[in-house]
Image (tube, coloured by chain):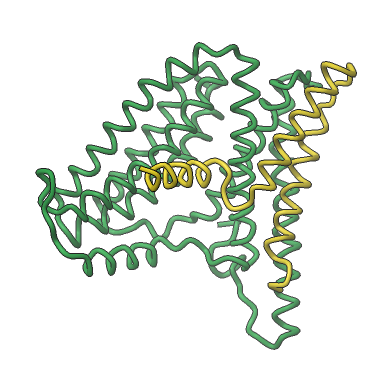
Chain colours: A green, B yellow
């Protein structure tokens, strides 16, 4: 189990971020519209996700490990670099920090404005589709992370455990506070996940292309801190450039790094 | 039908490729070159993909922030 701990932790953090985003949407639909239709939407999305896992899971395990690592490594690296790009831009002040509280307010305003209409046995179609889309989209990312990480490490069980703990923790917390989890340092979590996805993607992708890493699996212990150091230096460099330009133009510099969230949480 | 196909494609494009397709392209090209170096030239090019990833990230950040400072 100790050997699987990095895998469980990586999947846990990645899935927690997705679960928080899904929770925000479900709360907005349920609290402002109707819980029954919201739960129906959630259940329908979970059924679709289960079908995707049922089809993809066994298919993926049939692929040879080299081909799997090449394809999955490429996808994870692309995915991870996307996350890092957004997290760095947010930390540097070029992009607004993802604020679950304001995302929730936007969803609530839209939900209140939409008319109530019954369709296909669902009494509030808007609440159903809002909940369905939110859970399906965020759930797809969870499925992607669980299958790719779990299968590459040949330890799908550990990946499922990490994801399940994340979903349960976020759901229970959401039920207790009955509000979006605005205090969670989401950008720091996304930054961490971006580093892990990029590192694992680079490692597996290159292995799939035929590379033999010097140090074998232990190379990951070097790749992760190097990716973290490079990403943090990019963020620091951009933040300084952004502040200097704001000072030069006479506007109030943003303090995304230290006073609000930033990558350090 | 066409609209549904378009939104299906848009969803998967956004899901996999994201905001900047150049990053995805650089990663794919770097993997192809790595495979070529390993299998055709016998070079264990473990360094290529990390360098390409850092370069892709730097370039994408530069493109995203250029003119916004």
Residue farthest bottom in this picture:
A250
Q: Position of residue B62 (x, y in %)?
A: 74, 60
Please state which of residues B28 and A131 is positioned toward the viewer in this rendering: B28
Q: Quadrant of residue A184?
A: bottom left
Which residue sits at x=54%, y=49%? Answer: A190
Residue A242 in the image, given as x and y percentages of width and height: 71, 72
Camera-side residue of A242 and A1: A242
Percent coordinates x, y for residue A149 in the rendering: 53, 27
x and y, in percent, of residue A90 in the image? 59, 62
Q: In the image, is B36 to the left or to the right of A239?
A: right
A218 to B65, vertically: above or below: above
Q: Residue furthest front?
A: B2
Which one is nearer the viewer's eye here, A47 or A30?
A47
**Which corner quadrant holds the C terminus of chain A?**
bottom right
Residue at the image point whose x is 50% and y is 23% from the top: A150
Q: In which quarter of the view is residue A251 placed?
A: bottom right
Q: Would residue A232 be found to the left or right of residue B38 on screen?
A: left
A41 vs A155: above or below: below
Which residue is drawn at the image coordinates 78% and 23% (left, top)? B35
Say if A122 sits above or below A149 in the image: below
How many tags in the picture?
Answer: 0
């Amino acid at each position: 189990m100790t050997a699987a701990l990095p895998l469980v932790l990586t999947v846990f953090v990645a899935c927690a971020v997705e679960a928080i985003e899904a929770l925000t949407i479900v709360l907005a639909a349920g609290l402002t519209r109707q819980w029954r239709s919201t739960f129906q939407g959630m259940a329908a999305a979970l059924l679709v996700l289960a079908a995707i896992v049922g089809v993809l899971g066994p298919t993926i395990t049939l692929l040879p490990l080299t081909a799997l690592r090449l394809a999955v490594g490429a996808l994870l690296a692309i995915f991870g670099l996307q996350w890092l790009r957004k997290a760095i831009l947010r930390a540097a002040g070029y992009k607004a920090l993802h604020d679950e509280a304001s995302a929730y307010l936007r969803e609530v305003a839209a939900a209140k404005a939409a008319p109530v209409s019954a369709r296909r046995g669902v009494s509030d179609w808007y609440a159903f589709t809002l909940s369905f889309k939110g859970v399906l989209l965020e759930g797809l990312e969870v499925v992607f992370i669980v299958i790719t990480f779990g299968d590459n490490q040949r330890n799908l069980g550990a990946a499922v455990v990490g994801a399940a703990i994340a979903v349960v923790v976020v759901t229970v917390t959401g039920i207790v506070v009955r509000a979006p989890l605005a205090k969670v340092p989401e950008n720091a979590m996304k930054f961490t996940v971006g580093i892990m996805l990029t590192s694992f993607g680079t490692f597996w992708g290159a292995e799939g292309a035929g590379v033999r890493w010097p140090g074998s699996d232990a190379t990951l212990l070097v790749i992760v801190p190097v990716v973290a150091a490079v990403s943090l230096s990019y963020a620091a460099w951009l933040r300084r450039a952004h502040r200097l330009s704001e000072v030069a133009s006479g506007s109030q510099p943003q303090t995304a790094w230290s006073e609000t969230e930033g990558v350090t949480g | 039908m066409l609209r549904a196909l378009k939104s299906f494609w848009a969803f998967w494009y956004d899901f996999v490729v994201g905001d900047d397709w150049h990053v995805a392209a650089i990663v794919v090209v770097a993997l192809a070159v790595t495979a070529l170096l390993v299998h055709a030239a016998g070079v264990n090019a473990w360094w290529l993909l990390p360098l390409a990833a850092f370069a892709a990230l730097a370039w994408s950040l530069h493109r995203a922030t250029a003119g916004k400072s």
